[in-house]
């Protein structure tokens, strides 16, 4: 992996937004459309704010989530809600958003159709990942019920996931999809997450440290705060 260190997070958000926009624009020079997979959580919010104002052919960009909680989009825990409020606004409002949630108590009804939609977009142009201090990325969690399935070669593009401590079922892009992206980046803040990333690299076991599954070819953006 390649580690980019920044003096502060404000510089990181600007650089990362410019990187994403540049790669999307480059892809659209030779293809009709580009695709962008984004994480939820609190960390990436500032880059959404910057990126949403960038002048780009957003109507040619398909936006999807790296993972999602199985809750309606009006639920405060919904990653789709976060994107609609902080990214799919301003100029980026013209982008085409692919939502995963289809209703029901668990994500086991329409995943085949949704996975096929994602397969049609492969390879994804740009994937931006986050990471927890437990070394999970997307919803690839240590102890996840379908973690081995999501890590396997040839896995479905979208996999349902539950894990100890999670408040709701989730769906996640598989490691196969993440690793197949043309550009694969991770953004983290603080010493604790950097230490977790270094531990994952040392372990090298995606079943214990799922982020280890995506380290090859990964560009990491890090700032202390």
Image (tube, grey):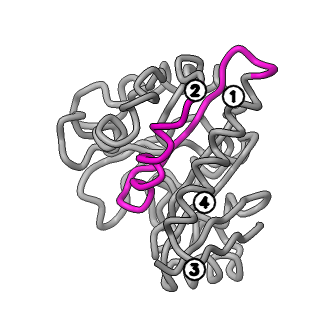
Question: Where is mark 1, residue-wise?
Answer: 122
Residue drawn at (70%, 70%) of the image: 4
Nearer to the camera, 59 or 79:
59
Tag 3 and tag 4, C-beta contact below 8 Å: no
- From mark 1 to mark 4, how far is it between C-alphas? 19 Å
Q: Is residue 102 left or right of residue 88?
A: left
Q: Nearer the viewer, mark 2 or mark 4?
A: 4
Tag 2 and tag 1, C-beta contact below 8 Å: yes
Classify 103 as above or below 209: above
- From mark 3 to mark 4, how far is it between C-alphas? 11 Å
Question: Where is mark 4, residue-wise?
Answer: 186
Tag 2 and tag 3, C-beta contact below 8 Å: no
Q: From the top left corner, tell me how far across and down residue 138 is, in percent.
A: 50, 53
Residue drawn at (45%, 20%) of the image: 94
Q: Please identify the quadrant where the N terminus is shown.
A: bottom right
- From mark 1 to mark 3, how far is it between C-alphas? 30 Å
Q: Is residue 54 magenta?
A: yes
Q: Is residue 203 magenta?
A: no
Nearer to the camera, 148 or 140:
140
- From mark 2 to mark 3, how far is it between C-alphas? 30 Å
Q: Secondary structure at mark 1?
A: loop
Q: Secondary structure at mark 3?
A: helix
Nearer to the camera, 145 or 90:
90
Classify 157 as above or below 133: above
- From mark 2 to mark 4, how far is it between C-alphas? 20 Å
Question: Where is mark 3, residue-wise?
Answer: 194
Counting other residues with Cα less than 10 Å from the Cα at mark 4, is it few (<14), some (14-19), or many (20 or more)? Answer: many
Looking at the image, the residue that sits furthest to the top is 32
Question: Where is mark 2, residue-wise?
Answer: 118
The range drawn in magenta is 29-56
Specify the quadrant of the image occupied by residue 164.
bottom left
């Amino acid at each position: 992996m390649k580690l980019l260190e920044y003096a502060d997070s404000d510089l990181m958000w600007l650089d990362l937004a410019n990187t994403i926009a540049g790669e999307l624009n480059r892809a659209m020079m030779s293809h009709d459309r580009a695709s962008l997979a984004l994480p939820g959580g609190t960390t990436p919010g500032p880059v959404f704010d910057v990126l949403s104002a960038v002048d780009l052919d957003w109507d040619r960009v398909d936006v999807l989530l790296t993972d999602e909680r199985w809750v309606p989009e009006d639920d405060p825990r919904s990653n789709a809600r976060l994107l609609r409020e902080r990214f799919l606004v301003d100029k980026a409002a013209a982008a085409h958003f692919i939502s995963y949630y289809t209703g029901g108590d668990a994500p086991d009804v329409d995943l085949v159709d949704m996975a096929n939609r994602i397969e049609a977009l492969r390879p994804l142009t740009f994937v931006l990942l986050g990471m927890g201090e437990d070394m999970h990325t997307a919803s690839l969690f240590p102890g996840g019920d379908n973690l081995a399935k999501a890590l396997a070669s040839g896995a479905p593009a979208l996999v349902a996931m539950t894990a100890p401590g999670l408040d709701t079922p989730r769906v996640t892009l598989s490691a196969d999809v993440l690793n197949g992206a043309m550009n694969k980046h991770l953004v983290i803040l603080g010493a604790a997450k950097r230490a977790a990333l270094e531990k994952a690299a040392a372990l090298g076991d995606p079943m214990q440290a799922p982020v280890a599954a995506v380290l090859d070819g990964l560009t990491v953006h890090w700032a202390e705060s």
